[in-house]
Amino acid sequence: MAETQIQDEFHEKMAAAGVKALWERTMHNPREPVSEPPRAWRWAEIEPLIDMAVAETGMDVAERRVLSLANPDLDIPAGASVTTNLNAGIQVLMPGETARVHRHTANALRFVLEGGNGTTTVDGKVCPMNKGDLILTPGGTWHEHTHAGDSRIVWLDSLDVPFHRAMHTQFFDPGPAGNFPPLPPDEAYLNGGLIPQAGPGMQAPAYSPQFRYAWEDVCATLDAMPPAEDGSKTLRYANPATGGPAMNIFDVYMIELAGGEATIPFRTTANGFCLVVEGEGQSTIGDQIIDWGPYDVFTLPHWNRYSHKASGDGAKLFMGTDREILRRLDLLREERG
Ligand code: GTQ
Ligand code: FE2
């Protein structure tokens, strides 16, 4: 706004009254949402920072030793986001270290990059953390980490904290842990289609009763399923009791790409990020091309049309999205092709 405009009486009086002229702010009403460009974080750059972070911090100082992936398009002083509604970071736990029990309203997941003899205990269920495992801590569940191995454990954390921040629904309890709902062990859910029913001493929770999704099971399911027309395979980490998303408003997938075949272009009002689990390739996202390799992370910001293509040997991409938030609000739009 020009200096002279602010000086005039109309604008002075509007400012004093706390109003603004809409016609001076909105030049046009865009038909399509404005989107951010995709962003990528390179494992080659992050990996050396892990040892430096360990040298820099004890758990007494850091509580959680997390390198947050800070998207410059979304960064605010209150905290980093990887994409709209989701954050992500690389967490490291050293032998003998523990992270104290706590719970929060935000949904959280960990995808293990370097395993060892570590565990996450979620509402009393002990979940081993082996390479490739996914461990959920749905909002409200008590969780803590232990490490009885002899080398570092590294995982990708992702939480829907930015959404809770926007909704002002972020609550945190430091522990000690309260009463856990009595849940069957995760093993009781490992035969898809056979679901333990609630009964005496067994409560049906509002979230997935399964907290750990082992890498071997993911690979076995991918091997057993047929590819789509573009050669890709997509599996959803589901709440076994409902077939719905792994966590209420936080949806996660594993995508296997055949080498050399580009996926059918797709765009959605949802926001996602991909962690490259295996393989190398490139993704065309909006008007950019992102080359990627193991443990790189890149974003799929809303309404950018995207297509993935792995090099000769194929690849696996872990994807987290806020799709469920938009779907439940009837705000999901998706276009293939
Ligand atoms: O591991 O419980 O990256 O509570 C941020 C908050 C991880 C966790 C994060 C958390 C955790
Ligand atoms: Fe936590």
Image (cartoon, rainbow, N blue to C red):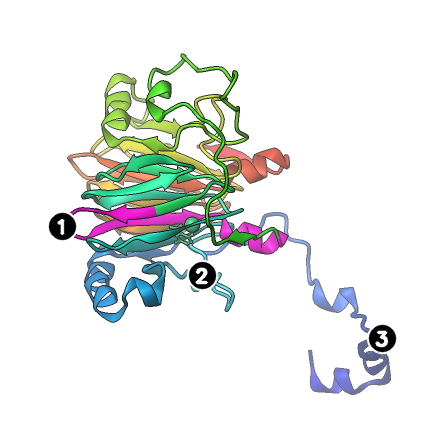
Q: Amino acid at mark 1?
A: Asp
Q: Which residues are magenta?
A: 145-168
Q: Earlier in the sequence, mark 3 or mark 2?
A: 3
Residue 286 in sight in this render:
no
Furthest residue to the top? 194
Q: Which residue is mark 3?
A: 17
Q: Could you tell me if the residues under marks 3 and 1 are in contact, i.e. CB atoms within 8 Å?
A: no
Frontmost residue, 122 versus 244: 122
Q: Is residue 242 left or right of residue 259?
A: right
Q: Which of the 4 image quarters holds residue 266?
A: top left
How crowded is the residue under tag 1: few (<14 C-alpha within 10 Å), some, or many (20+)? few
Dot in front, 3 or 2: 2
Q: Position of residue 79 (x, y in %)?
A: 47, 63
Give yes or no for residue 162 being in the magenta stretch: yes
Name the residue that disc number 2 marks: 80
**At 36% across and 61% down in the image, what residue appears?**
63
Check disc 2 and report its element: helix, strand or loop.
loop
Q: Residue 247 versus residue 282: which sits nearer the camera? A: 247
Q: What is the three-letter code of the residue carrying label 2?
A: Ala
Dot 3 falls on a residue whose secondary structure is helix
Q: Secondary structure at mark 1?
A: loop
